[in-house]
C-alpha cells in the first residue's frame, strides 16, 4: 500500500481550504480509500472540488505575474517609440545638408545666367533677404547709371574725333558692337573659374550628405545616379559650353526630389520635381527640343495635380497664381515659341519659389 499526500498551504487561499490535508490512497483493487480524518476522498464531488482549488490557486499565483510582465513590456515599448521619435526629429534637422547641396546647384545656374530658384537655408530671414535683393538691384542701377554717364563724354568725344577724321557713323557703331562682344566674351570666360569652384564644393557636400541619406534608407541606385550625374557635370565644364553645362546641372538636380522624399518634411518633394520639369522646359525650348518640352510639360501638369491636393486654405492665393502660370506656359509650349516659353517658364519658377516660402513660414 502506497500513500500520496497532496498538501495545499492555507497561506495561498484561506477561504478555499483551512489547514486542509487531502490524503490520496491508491489501491491495486481500484477502490477508494479513507483519509486519516475519516473522510471519503475520491468521490466525484471531491475530485471536482480539488480541480477547482487547483485552478483558483494557479490564477491567484500566476495572473499577477503575467499582468506585471505585460505592463513592463508596454513600458519598454513606449520608451522605444519615444526614442525613435527623438531620433527622427534630430535626423530631420540634419536635412540642412541636403538644402546646402541644392543651394549649391542653384548657385551654379545663377552664375551662368540660367533659370535659378532661391533656396532659403536655416537662419535666414525672408525680409532680410528681400531687402538685400532690393539693395543689390539699387546698387546695380546706380553703377549702370554712373557707367552710362561716364561713357557719354567718351561717346561725344569719339563722335567728334570721328567727324574730325571723317569716319562714318556706321563704322563707329560696328566698332562699338565688336568691343561690346569682346567684353561679353571676357565676362563669360571669367565665370568658369567660379563654376569650377562651385562644382568642387558640390563634391565635398555630396560626400558629407551620403552617410546621412544611407541612414535614411536611400538605395544604392539613387546614390549611384546622383554620383554619376555629378561626375558627368564635372567633365562637361571642360567644354565651357554654357548650354551643355546647364543641361547637365539640371540632370543632377533631377535626383534632388528623390533625396527629399527620404525625409519627413511638411513640403512635398513634388515641389522640387516641378522645379526640375519647368527648368528643363526652358532649357530644351532654347535648343528647339520641342518633343522633350512637350513631355516635360505633361509631367509638370501631373506633378502639379498631385501637389495641389496637399495645399492648405491659406495657400490659396499662391496656388491660383501658380495654376494660371502653368496654364500660360502650356499655351506657349503648344505654339513652340522659344522666347515666350523662356519668359513664362521663369514666371512659373518664381511662383514655385513663393510656394516654397509659404511652406517654410508654416514650419
Image: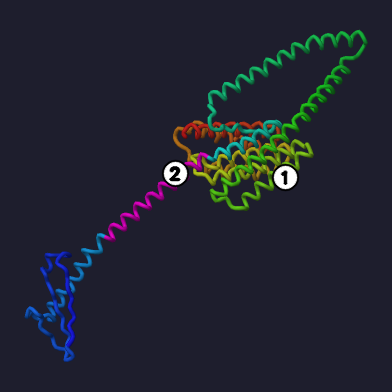
Residue plotted at (48% across, 38% down) = 311
Are circles 2 and 1 on residues that touch, CB within 8 Å?
no
- When the figure is inspected, residue 50 is found, relative to residue 220, above or below; the finding is below
Quadrant of the rendered structure where residue 172 is? top right
Residue plotted at (66% across, 33% down) = 107
Q: Residue pushed farthest left? A: 38
Residue plotted at (37% across, 52% down) = 76
- When the figure is inspected, residue 16 is found, relative to residue 256, above or below; the finding is below
Q: Give how far across and how far down residue 163 sits, in percent.
A: 89, 9
Q: CA distance from mark 2 to mark 1?
A: 38 Å
- What residue sits right under mark 1 in the picture? 232
Q: Give how far across and how far down residue 89 sits, in percent.
A: 47, 42
Q: Is residue 86 magenta?
A: yes
Crowding near the residue tagged with mark 2, few <14, some 14–19, many ≥20 C-alpha atoms within 10 Å: few
* Tag 2 secondary structure: helix
- When the figure is inspected, residue 169 is found, relative to residue 19, above or below; the finding is above
- When the figure is inspected, residue 38 is found, relative to residue 157, above or below; the finding is below
- What residue sits right under mark 2 in the picture? 86
Magenta stretch in the rendered image: 65-93
Magenta highlight: main SS: helix
Q: Give how far across and how far down residue 170 sits, in percent.
A: 87, 17
Residue plotted at (67% across, 37% down) = 201
Asked whether 162 or 80 is in front, the reply is 80
Q: Which mark is residue 112?
A: none
Amino acid at each position: 500500500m502506497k500513500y500520496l499526500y497532496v498538501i495545499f498551504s492555507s497561506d495561498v487561499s484561506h477561504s478555499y481550504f483551512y489547514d486542509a490535508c487531502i490524503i490520496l490512497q491508491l489501491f491495486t483493487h481500484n477502490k477508494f480509500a479513507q483519509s486519516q480524518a475519516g473522510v471519503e476522498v475520491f468521490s466525484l464531488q471531491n475530485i471536482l472540488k480539488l480541480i477547482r482549488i487547483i485552478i483558483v490557486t494557479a490564477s491567484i499565483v500566476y495572473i499577477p505575474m503575467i499582468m506585471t510582465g505585460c505592463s513592463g513590456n508596454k513600458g519598454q515599448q513606449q520608451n522605444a517609440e519615444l526614442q525613435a521619435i527623438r531620433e527622427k526629429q534630430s535626423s530631420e534637422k540634419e536635412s540642412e545638408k541636403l538644402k546646402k547641396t541644392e543651394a549649391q546647384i542653384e548657385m551654379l545656374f545663377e552664375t551662368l545666367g540660367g533659370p535659378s530658384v532661391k533656396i532659403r537655408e536655416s537662419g535666414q530671414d525672408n525680409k532680410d533677404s528681400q531687402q538685400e535683393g532690393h539693395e543689390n538691384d539699387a546698387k546695380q542701377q546706380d553703377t549702370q547709371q554712373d557707367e552710362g554717364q561716364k561713357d557719354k563724354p567718351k561717346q561725344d568725344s569719339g563722335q567728334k574725333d570721328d567727324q574730325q577724321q571723317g569716319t562714318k557713323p556706321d563704322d563707329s557703331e560696328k566698332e562699338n558692337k565688336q568691343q561690346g562682344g569682346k567684353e561679353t566674351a571676357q565676362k563669360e570666360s571669367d565665370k568658369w573659374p567660379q563654376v569650377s569652384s562651385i562644382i568642387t564644393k558640390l563634391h565635398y557636400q555630396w560626400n558629407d550628405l551620403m552617410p546621412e541619406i544611407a541612414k535614411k534608407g536611400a538605395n544604392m541606385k539613387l546614390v549611384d545616379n546622383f554620383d554619376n550625374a555629378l561626375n558627368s557635370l564635372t567633365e562637361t565644364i571642360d567644354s565651357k559650353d554654357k548650354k551643355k553645362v546647364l543641361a547637365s546641372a539640371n540632370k543632377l538636380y533631377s535626383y534632388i526630389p528623390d533625396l527629399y522624399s527620404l525625409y519627413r518634411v511638411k513640403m512635398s518633394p513634388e515641389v522640387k520635381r516641378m522645379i526640375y520639369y519647368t527648368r528643363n522646359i526652358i532649357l530644351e525650348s532654347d535648343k528647339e527640343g520641342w518633343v522633350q518640352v512637350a513631355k516635360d510639360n505633361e509631367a509638370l501638369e501631373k506633378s502639379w495635380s498631385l501637389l495641389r491636393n496637399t495645399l492648405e486654405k491659406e495657400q490659396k492665393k499662391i496656388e491660383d497664381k501658380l495654376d494660371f502660370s502653368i496654364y500660360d506656359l502650356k499655351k506657349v509650349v503648344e505654339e513652340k515659341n522659344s522666347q515666350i516659353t523662356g519668359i513664362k517658364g521663369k514666371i512659373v519658377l518664381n511662383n514655385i519659389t513663393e510656394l516654397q516660402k509659404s511652406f517654410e513660414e508654416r514650419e
